[in-house]
Image (tube, rainbow, N blue to C red):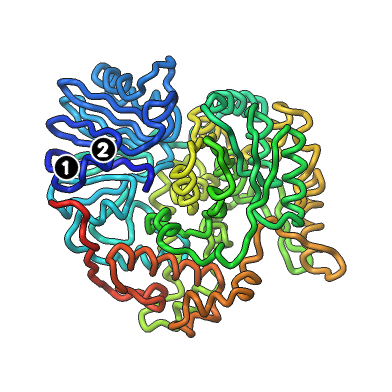
């Protein structure tokens, strides 16, 4: 990948990777870290520092409380004086690898917005941001059956596992050490009373202002919804906006009006069969833990010359209600969401209602497998929910912990950051604190809309085409009518996966040797293709078939392709 952090606890770095692959290599007696990042040394971006006692490398986006220029030097010096408080003072989306001379560790940010993979299979513990690079340090790998099952049927690999037994991930809100890992308590719900909308508006303005001074031309991935327009209204100098879909779609038409409202140009990213025919150049950004369908913007580098690319990823999860269960009432054979919370929340039922992309055909498909159990999905979700309980004070927050811990779209950011200077607004520590301090009944679209209208009273001049009314209830009723009445038009904000898949005969291209999978849902079939592509590229040969992804074997060993450097 074009951006990468790779390190070894102890010695032996040169025997595993070529230092020439990296822009900077920092080393001490207990840690060696290489970093490849075109933004290394830029303000608020990746940084490195070493002295005669140790070293520190920060990968990603980081803002310091006192505005110091070199974040790595600041962290190293402050950590020696204050310990872990130095990490807690950081603001942004980052990984920190540090050796103070007395302590060695790798820290994630509070929401693990960047993954850090690690393995002990090659001797000293190796870690890095590119799962394939970490996997290739081992001579032999074992396919992790549980992970394969989850990725195929739930859309993500849960908890800290990967697709291979020998490689794991640094825990959510956690720290990696030469031996073992730890889970921290930065991401814990502590609700309190305050002006939720007013405080969110103030914090959003500061978060946007912090990210407004990135150097170079600025672009934005812009939809017609509420999230990305917040960046357009709050960050001056955005010159170009890009929307996935056809120019004639309602989504693109509204997005174009939004761009014009704030003085930016607008272009669409057309969707054709190549949107789903993903090779390893795209699938590698999933790191084998989620699905490539979330990389909606692939191809943008062919039309965008921007230096910086903004996006509104995870606003719906952290600042709105995507993972908040609401009361529902039945109407016309469907259910309508109300604004109140249920008296007895059911996190499992809520999550299985497609919140993580669980396909309705998964249970029946599993029942057809020799070792398949249609209830296994729910059991796995229940186990993961139990792991999340220690971070909650109310069961209403369980789906949010689960969803944010297992966000199924990190491939989106990994791809974007490999091509542009990418900024993740929602990782701002003030916004995370707002999320953890706000009771779930106030983490709502209504609160968010109140807040962004305080930033710009005209931000809702052009409403999203799928939410034309100010009332959520009326929007749901109108959406139901448009989807079900033939004389009313319905235009989804996302490309129609089913029609594109059929139009380009992707069963023939992706699953020609697995006709038994052709009746499955499009999204499940695309996951199967992702897994097959990633594992086969890792091994350098055909090691797994599509059918084995859906009904995985008990165990299987794969041999990574040869490394390009000597050991």
Residue under numbered circle 1: 13
Point out residue 154 in the picture as x, y percentages from the top left corner.
47, 63
Point out residue 164 in the picture as x, y percentages from the top left corner.
28, 61
Residue under numbered circle 2: 34
> From mark 2 to mark 1, how far is it between C-alphas?
9 Å
Q: Is residue 268 visible?
A: yes
Q: Residue at x 12, y 39 (%)?
A: 11
Pointer 1: residues within 10 angstroms few (<14), some, or many (20+)? many
Considering only vertical position in the picture, is 18 above or below 198?
A: below
Q: Is residue 171 left or right of residue 243?
A: left
379, 252: nearer the viewer: 252
Residue lying at the far right in this picture: please name it.
487
Secondary-structure class at tag 2: strand
Q: Is there a contact, CB below 8 Å, between mark 2 and mark 1? A: yes
Q: Residue at x 21, y 56 (%)?
A: 563
Point out residue 127 in the picture as x, y percentages from the top left corner.
25, 45
Q: Residue at x 73, y 52 (%)?
A: 251
Considering only vertical position in the picture, is 424 above or below 562?
A: above
Pointer 2: residues within 10 angstroms few (<14), some, or many (20+)? many
Q: Is residue 348 left or right of residue 122?
A: right
Considering only vertical position in the picture, is 31 above or below 397?
A: above
Determine the image quadrant of residue 544: bottom left
């Amino acid at each position: 990948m074009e951006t990468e952090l790779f390190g070894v606890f102890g010695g032996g770095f040169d025997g595993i990777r070529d230092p020439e692959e990296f822009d900077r290599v920092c080393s001490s007696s207990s840690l060696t870290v290489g970093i490849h990042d075109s933004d290394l040394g830029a303000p608020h971006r990746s940084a490195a520092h070493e002295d005669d006692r140790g070293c520190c490398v920060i990968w990603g986006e980081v803002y310091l409380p006192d505005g110091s220029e070199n974040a790595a030097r600041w962290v190293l010096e402050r950590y020696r004086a204050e310990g872990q408080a130095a990490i807690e003072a950081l603001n942004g989306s980052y990984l920190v690898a540090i050796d103070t001379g007395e302590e060695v560790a790798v820290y994630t940010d509070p929401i693990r917005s960047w993954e850090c993979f690690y393995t002990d299979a090659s001797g000293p513990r190796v870690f890095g941001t590119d799962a394939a690079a970490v996997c290739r340090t081992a001579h032999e790998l074992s396919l992790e059956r549980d992970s394969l099952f989850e990725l195929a049927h739930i859309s993500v690999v849960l908890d800290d596992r990967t697709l291979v037994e020998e490689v794991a991930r640094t825990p959510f809100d956690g720290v990696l050490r030469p031996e073992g890992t730890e889970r921290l308590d930065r991401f814990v719900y502590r609700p309190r009373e305050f002006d939720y909308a007013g405080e969110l508006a103030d914090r959003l303005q500061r978060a946007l202002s912090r990210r407004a001074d990135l150097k170079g031309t600025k672009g934005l991935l812009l939809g017609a919804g509420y999230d990305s327009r917040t960046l357009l209204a709050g960050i001056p100098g955005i010159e170009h906006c890009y929307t996935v879909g056809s120019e004639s779609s309602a989504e693109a038409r509204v997005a174009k009006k939004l761009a014009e409202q704030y003085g930016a140009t607008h272009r669409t990213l057309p969707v054709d069969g190549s949107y789903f025919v993903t090779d390893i150049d795209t699938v590698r950004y999933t790191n084998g833990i989620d699905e490539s369908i979330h990389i909606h913007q692939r191809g943008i580098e062919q039309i965008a010359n921007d230096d910086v690319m903004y996006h509104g990823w995870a606003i719906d999860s952290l600042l709105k209600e995507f993972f908040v269960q609401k009361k529902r009432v039945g109407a016309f054979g469907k259910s309508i969401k109300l604004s109140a919370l249920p008296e007895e929340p059911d996190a499992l039922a809520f999550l299985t209602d497609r919140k993580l992309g669980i396909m309705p055909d998964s249970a029946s498909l599993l029942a057809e497998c020799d070792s398949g159990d249609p209830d296994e999905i729910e059991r796995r979700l229940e186990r993961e929910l139990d792991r999340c309980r220690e971070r909650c004070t109310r069961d209403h927050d369980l789906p949010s912990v689960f969803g944010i811990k297992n966000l199924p779209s990190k491939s989106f950011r990994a791809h974007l950051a490999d091509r542009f200077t990418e900024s993740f607004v929602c990782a701002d520590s003030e916004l995370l604190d707002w999320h953890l301090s706000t009771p779930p009944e106030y983490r709502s679209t209504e609160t968010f809309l109140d807040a962004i209208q305080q930033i710009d009273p005209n931000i809702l001049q052009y409403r999203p085409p799928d939410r034309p009314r100010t009332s959520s209830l009326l929007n749901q009723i109108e959406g139901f009518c448009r989807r079900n009445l033939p004389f009313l038009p319905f235009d989804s904000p996302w490309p129609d996966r089913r029609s594109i898949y059929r139009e380009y005969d992707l069963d023939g291209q992706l699953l020609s040797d697995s006709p038994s999978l052709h009746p499955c849902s499009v999204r499940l079939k695309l996951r199967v293709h992702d897994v097959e592509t990633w594992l086969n590229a890792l091994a350098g040969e055909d090691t797994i078939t599509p059918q084995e992804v859906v009904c995985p074997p008990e165990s299987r060993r794969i041999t990574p392709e040869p490394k390009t450097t000597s050991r």
